[in-house]
């Protein structure tokens, strides 16, 4: 699977974009920056979007992508709670058409909202998606995404620590994890359902204990104001515990 990172931060600026990445150019995971980072023809290749939860930094570009692709249908997969937030906030018809409603724009629905159930795998465009519950400040899912050639990726979405139950259910070759706060804000990270370098190290240690191996790990969802501090802490932690951790920046491509 070819992963192209479009946005790897929690806040938007000239140099930082909201969270989203593409798998093989056709499946988008999160919708923070799907229009700001892609040409119109690149946007047209996206057939499916997976959303981990309903916070703004993850769903923001859904209406603009729908507007730019109103001649076709794009499937949006998420747990029902996320689809409900999306429908009541960005797709409520108040400031833009409701692109999920056939009566609202050009007489057709541009977006097909597809509910996912936790631990019920679905086949989407040749990928197998397993939604797994994670602990965040609203109902949220992580996704194990398997390609036809048997490669598996796990994306945590926004999550706090205590992921042992998640690790039991997956077997990824690669992990894309969130990394929001520096260690000095560990309590805030826990309270708001996020990770910091020391809690990630604990989760990776649990992964190794449970699974007997460690996947390569790429971090996204960085708060720009703490980025330097977080990077220094991760570098130290990775060295100390021999952990294979890297950061993704906007535009980075990895193959997993
Ligand atoms: Zn969130
Ligand atoms: Zn977020």
Image: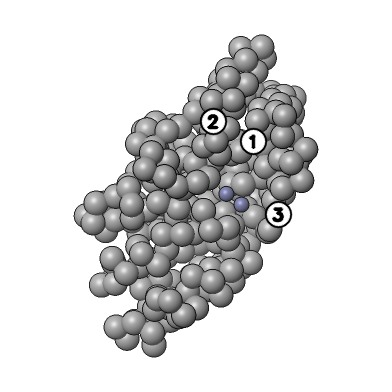
The answer to whether mark 3 and mark 2 are in CB contact below 8 A is no
The residue at the point 59 percent across, 27 percent down is 230
Name the secondary structure under disc 1: loop
Percent across and percent down for residue 49 are 44, 57
Q: Which badge, 1 or 3, is on the more N-terminal residue?
A: 3
C-alpha gap between disc 3 and disc 2: 22 Å
The answer to whether mark 1 and mark 3 are in CB contact below 8 A is no
199 displayed left or right of 15: right
Find residue 181 and name its label. 1
C-alpha gap between disc 2 and disc 1: 9 Å
**What is the crowding at mark 2: few (fewer than 14 residues within 10 Å), some, or many (at least 20)?**
some
Disc 2 within 8 angstroms of ligand 2 (CB) = no
Percent across and percent down for residue 124 are 44, 57
Please identify, in this view, whether the residue under mark 1 or under mark 3 is nearer the observer.
Answer: 1
137 displayed left or right of 247: right
Disc 3 within 8 angstroms of ligand 1 (CB) = yes
248 displayed left or right of 222: left
Residue 212 figure quarter? top right
In the rendered image of this protein, does residue 205 appear above or below residue 160? above
């Amino acid at each position: 699977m070819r992963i192209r990172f479009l946005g790897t931060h929690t806040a938007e600026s000239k140099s930082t974009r909201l969270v989203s990445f593409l798998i093989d150019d056709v499946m988008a995971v999160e919708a923070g920056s799907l229009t700001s980072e892609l040409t119109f023809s690149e946007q047209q290749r996206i057939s499916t979007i997976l959303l981990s939860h309903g916070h703004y930094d993850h769903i923001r570009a859904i209406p603009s992508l729908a507007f730019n692709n109103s001649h076709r249908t794009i499937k949006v997969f998420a747990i029902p709670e996320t689809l409900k937030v999306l429908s009541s906030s960005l797709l409520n018809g108040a400031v833009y058409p409701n692109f999920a409603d056939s009566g609202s724009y050009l007489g057709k629905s541009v977006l097909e909202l597809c509910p996912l159930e936790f631990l019920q795998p679905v086949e989407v465009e040749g990928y197998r998606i397993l939604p797994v519950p994670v602990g965040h400040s609203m109902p949220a899912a992580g996704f194990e995404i398997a390609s036809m050639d048997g490669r598996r990726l796990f994306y945590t979405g926004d999550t706090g620590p205590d992921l042992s139950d998640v690790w039991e259910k997956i077997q990824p070759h690669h992990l894309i994890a969130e990394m929001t706060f520096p260690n000095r804000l560990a309590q805030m990270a826990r309270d708001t359902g996020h990770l910091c370098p020391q809690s990630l190290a604990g989760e990776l240690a649990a992964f190794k204990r449970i699974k007997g191996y460690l996947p390569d790990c790429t971090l996204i969802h960085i708060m720009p104001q703490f980025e330097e501090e977080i990077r220094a802490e991760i570098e130290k932690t990775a060295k100390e515990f021999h952990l294979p951790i890297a950061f993704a920046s906007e535009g980075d491509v990895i193959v997993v």
